[in-house]
Amino acid sequence: MELTKQGQEALERIIKFAKDEAIDIAGGKVRRTSSRFCLGVEHGDYNGTELFGVATDRFIWMAYRPNGTDKVRLYSGNFPDDGVIDFKLGEIPEPKSAAIAETWGRFAYGVDYILRREGVELSQGIDGVIYGNIPGGGMSRSASLSLNLILSLLDANGIEIEDKMRIVDLAQAVENDYIGSPCGQLDQIMILFGREGMGSYYNPAERSLDYVPLGAGGEELRIVVMDTGTERPGLEKSTYKIRRAECEELASILQKSNYDVSCLADVKDKEMYEKILVQLREKYPDLCDRLIYIFGAQKRFYKMLEAWKAGDIETVGRIFREDGAGLRDYYKISGPELETMCDIVRTVPGVLGERMLGGGDKGASGALVLAKSIEAVKQAVNRAYPRSRPDFADKYAVHICKVVDGVRVYEGLL
């Protein structure tokens, strides 16, 4: 399996980092884990909705080899100030402690902690070098890193977990229980199960995954990610955490009001929905706004899925845009730079839909665009964004993404 040009450039960086930091990866493997692009429902996973998205070609690459000891030595080319993360298996900082708050190494510590807690005993350490080009918000860099570390450490220890959903659970636990980030499972699912050229449809009630090809007529669809250049802290420090707590609070209120719901996704019946708003909106206006978005997004979700199957990319784009308005106006999870990007590309003919991506506040926005309009989108962003947001004039980027396999392993490159 040959590397793409992007992969070859990453490998060259990794080899240089390994030499500079005296980390021995000779004869090892390279694991590549992707980013993701959610088509629906953004912020739906922790609310219990069905999910649909694709794995995209911005990656984290990790070159690693077993080192014959019980120590892990890792270096990230993206965080050189952290130096080499060096620890003995089982001897790591406490979960959610101040010692891990500002280092990327918390993901490696978290993987060791969660695997041991769940009865997966690691005895073989690794030496590894990591490099990634996933934007820092909106495309699931943290989930990609967690999955890469889990899969690589399991491989080095000769451990195979056949149930991929267990891998998803483990990766979520790294962020939830060790780091303190309240993420759901959307990101891990879309990356781990991602398949080239396919959309991934996840049904949480059945914990089932189906692949859905884009129907005939959709060949001109392109996925564009617009990195605003802003730096988004972890979800544990963002509005995401507040929104999740609000949704859980509303679900609890509904249960105490004798509604048969366990999460907001259970509010599917229009009569129930309207009754809830009549009863609660005056007292809980913000919480009800969150429900308005989730209820509408679920209704749109099935229309979008059918449009994807039919190759009706205009409808897919329109729904993507409507979701963006809901995220902005009712879920209130977007940010000024994210909306600036959306406002800019919305003016370009051939842009079918646009909205913020991921956890919210900062990071990246996304757009669904006709192939013939890609250059016009780039030109519009390059012209207008630096003028509108001069503080980020040298930091933003426009990524034209392909739908790819979420995980690949390369051997014989080192």
Image (cartoon, rainbow, N blue to C red):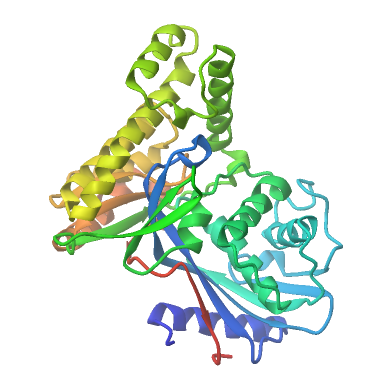
* Along the line of sight, the residue nearer the viewer: 29 or 119: 119
Residue at 46 percent of width and 39 percent of height: 43
When the figure is inspected, residue 369 is found, relative to residue 82, above or below; the finding is above
Q: Residue furthest front?
A: 206
Residue 154 seen in the current view: yes
When the figure is inspected, residue 297 is found, relative to residue 358, above or below; the finding is above
* Along the line of sight, the residue nearer the viewer: 111 or 307: 307
Left or right: where does residue 21 sit relative to residue 282? right
| Count of numbered marks | 0
Residue at 18 percent of width and 54 percent of height: 310
Which percent across, then down, holds residue 22? 73, 85
Which percent across, then down, holds residue 165? 57, 57
Image quadrant where residue 269 sits: top left
Which percent across, then down, holds residue 321? 26, 40
Left or right: where does residue 352 sit relative to residue 137? left
Residue 398 seen in the current view: no
Which percent across, then down, holds residue 190? 45, 57
* Along the line of sight, the residue nearer the viewer: 160 or 86: 160
Q: Where is the C terminus found, in terms of image quarters?
A: bottom right
Residue at 66 percent of width and 72 percent of height: 160
Q: Where is the N terminus found, in terms of image quarters?
A: bottom left
